[in-house]
Structures are given as structure tokens and as C-alpha cells.
Image: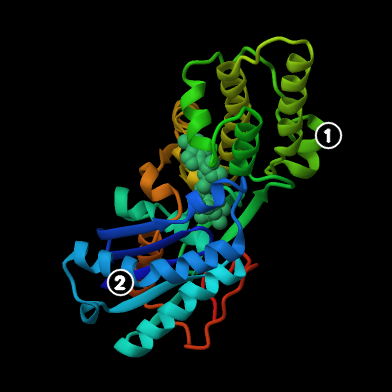
Amino acid sequence: PLVLGIETSCDETGVGIVRGHTLLADAVASSVDEHARFGGVVPEVASRAHLEAMVPTIERACETAGISLHDVDAIAVTNGPGLAGALLVGVASAKALALGLGKPLYGVNHLASHVAVDQLEHGPLPEPCLAMLVSGGHSSLLRVEDVTVGVDPMGETIDDAAGEAFDKVARLLGLPFPGGPHIDRMAREGDSVAIDFPRGLTARRDLERHRFDFSFSGLKTAVARWVEARERAGEPVPVADVAASFQEAVCDVLVRKALDAASSEGIDHLLIGGGVAANSRLRHLAEERAERLGIRVRVPRPGLCTDNGAMVAALGAEMVARGRTPSSLDLPADSSLPVSSVLAG
Ligand code: ATP
Ligand code: FE
Ligand code: MG
């Protein structure tokens, strides 16, 4: 099926077009620069930016794919979780398209689409698989039996998300927002064992209750204390070493817990998605350790890891292919849509 997908859960206006597992277009307009001076996404600013970018982004996607809107078989849209006002713009646009074109509408869960996107790169999803979603808003371990039906949360962050930790530590080090890519780059020049930063929720007593959960706020605080102590002593802050050691602490815990979750379920495929999956150290470490356990790792290319419309189209196409019932035109935008319900409305 030819499916157009719309994503507006955060600060990216994404419009993707796929035919089955083939990506035809992935147009993304980001308002990230408008948020940079605030050090985080400002919801109101994001909503207005979506409204401005929506039509041009749809046009750009159709042009790239070489299709007319009338050719599409279905419209898919992220209807949660995410920023309420931002989601509303995408959902309203998708409804208008579905209604105007007389095509079915599929509301999809943002987290499940971060998983489904991998089929555009590596072919049919291995199911069951263990998915680790790491982004600015989420750090979750999910068991995926059928991505078009639901995903089972096994664990998640109890405080900051992994991407949030990258962004906050970057800010502390004077690097621009969003900080993940900058830390990734700086870390290559640094020593990852220079500073022994804490690995959250890995002590034996924590594992009893939080075996598959994450915590990054203690790590962030530890980095802040370390940097402050240096500054107080009038010594220069070795930014590359701090970046590398911090990144190692995050990636070590993420990979350890993801592989533990996969092993405990007897699952031999680990799929990593979300913006932080673009991290070069995370990819490397996951592959290295998974190989020893006989677990295959799949990570989409960086452009498909961050929020985009192609992932929504990918999940929509899968829903069409598997004969799922379309959403009604009453489809709500649900900012706190639970990850376990892929299909909403
Ligand atoms: P959501 O959580 O709802 O998916 P989001 O916009 O925060 O929304 P993404 O666009 O998937 O999610 O990811 C953005 C996050 O990914 C930011 O926190 C950014 O710093 C982080 N990120 C991007 N590239 C890298 C990288 N190479 N290394 C580490 N973090 C990265
Ligand atoms: Fe996302
Ligand atoms: Mg984003």
C-alpha cells in the first residue's frame, strides 16, 4: 500500500511516504532552532511551527515521491504520546486529508512507530523482538510481539530520559542544544574511562525492583558536581573526557539492561530506536556485547532514528497490510497515550 504518514508529536513536522517497506519520501521541517535559546522545546512555539510547516512539508514529500495525494491508499498520523498542542496539528491535518481524499485514517502510537521504522531499512521486523527506545522524552525497553497490535513495556526511566541527560550535560559543558550529537562528537577526542561516573539502578538492591528500569538524573548531578569542583579549584574542565565518560556511563547501562531484557525473554533480536540510537558509541557497544550472546542488533540509520514522518507511514503501511481496522474520524490526540496501545481511536 501507498501510505502517507504525519508526525508532529514534538518539534519535528514530519511527512513520510512509503510503499510497503519502501521509503519514497521523508520530508522533515524542524523548529529545533527556535527552541535552542530556551534550552528545550517550548510547546506553544512547536505548535505554531507545525501549523506553518505542514502544507509545505506535505507538498515537498509528494514531490520527492513523485506522487499525487490522490494516489495514496491511507493516511497515518501520530496521535500520541507527545505535546498536546503539537499532536493536534498533525491529527487535524491527517483528518482533513483522509476526509478530503476519502481514504482511511490510521492513528498510530509514536513509540511503536519508532520501532516499525526499521523495516524501511532492514526489511520485515523480526517479531518477537526487544526494542529499546531512547530519545529526548523516552527511555523504554519494550517487548514487541506484533507491532501493529501493541508493545509490552518491560522497563523505563524513573526520572530523566537518556536524550534529556545528553541535552542537560551538554548544556553544562557549554555545548549547543540539542546536545546529543555534540557530546557524541566531543567524546571521540576524550577518554571514556577518565572519570568513573555512576551507573544508575545497577546496584543489587536496585535490581530487585528496577531490573529493566533506568535512572539518569543521578548521573547528570554527578557530572554537574564534578565540573563544579574543577571550576572551583580554578582548573580547566577537560570537556572531551567528561563527555566521553558520561556517554560511556549512559551507553553501558542502556546496553546492559537491554541485553538482559532480551536474554530473559529468550529473544534474539534487539532493535534500537529514538534519537539517542544515533549515538555512535551506543551502536558500537550494543553490537559488540550482543554478538557474544548471539543476539542480532538492528539500528535504523540516524535520520530514521529521530522523529520523522516515514516511521508513521511505515507503521501505517504495516497496519494496512495486516488488515487492521482504521481509526474513526473522531480520533483524539492523546498526549499521554500509553505505549501498550498502538491503535487508538
Ligand atoms: P520523543 O522523545 O517524543 O521521541 P524527541 O524529539 O526528544 O521526542 P528524538 O527526535 O527521537 O526525540 O530525539 C532527540 C534526542 O536525541 C535529543 O535529546 C538529542 O540530544 C538526542 N540525540 C540525537 N543524536 C544523538 C547522538 N548522536 N547521541 C546522543 N544523543 C543524541
Ligand atoms: Fe520520538
Ligand atoms: Mg525531536
| Residue 272 shows up from this direction | yes
- Comparing labels 2 and 1, the label whose residue is closer to the camera: 2
Q: Position of residue 343 (x, y in %)?
A: 51, 74
Q: Quadrant of the N terminus?
A: bottom left
Helix, strand or loop status at disc 1? helix
| Residue 133 shows up from this direction | no
In the displayed structure image, the side of residue 166 where residue 74 appears, left or right: left
In the displayed structure image, the side of residue 270 where residue 16 appears, left or right: left
Give, as a three-letter code, the residue at label 1.
Arg
Q: Position of residue 121 (x, y in %)?
A: 30, 49
- Numbered-mark total: 2
Checking the image for residue 105, the label placed there is none
Q: From the image, tell me which residue sits under label 1.
A: 205
Q: Residue furthest right?
A: 205
Checking the image for residue 3, the label placed there is 2
Residue at x 61% of width, y 41% of height: 162
In the displayed structure, 28 sits above or below 343; it is above
Helix, strand or loop status at disc 2? strand
CA separation in Å, label 2 and label 1:
48 Å
Quarter of the image for residue 236 reads top right
The front one of 18 and 15 is 15
Q: Position of residue 49 (x, y in %)?
A: 48, 64
Give, as a three-letter code, the residue at label 2.
Val
In the displayed structure image, the side of residue 109 where residue 194 appears, left or right: right
Label 1 crowd (10 A; few <14 / some 14-19 / many >=20)? few
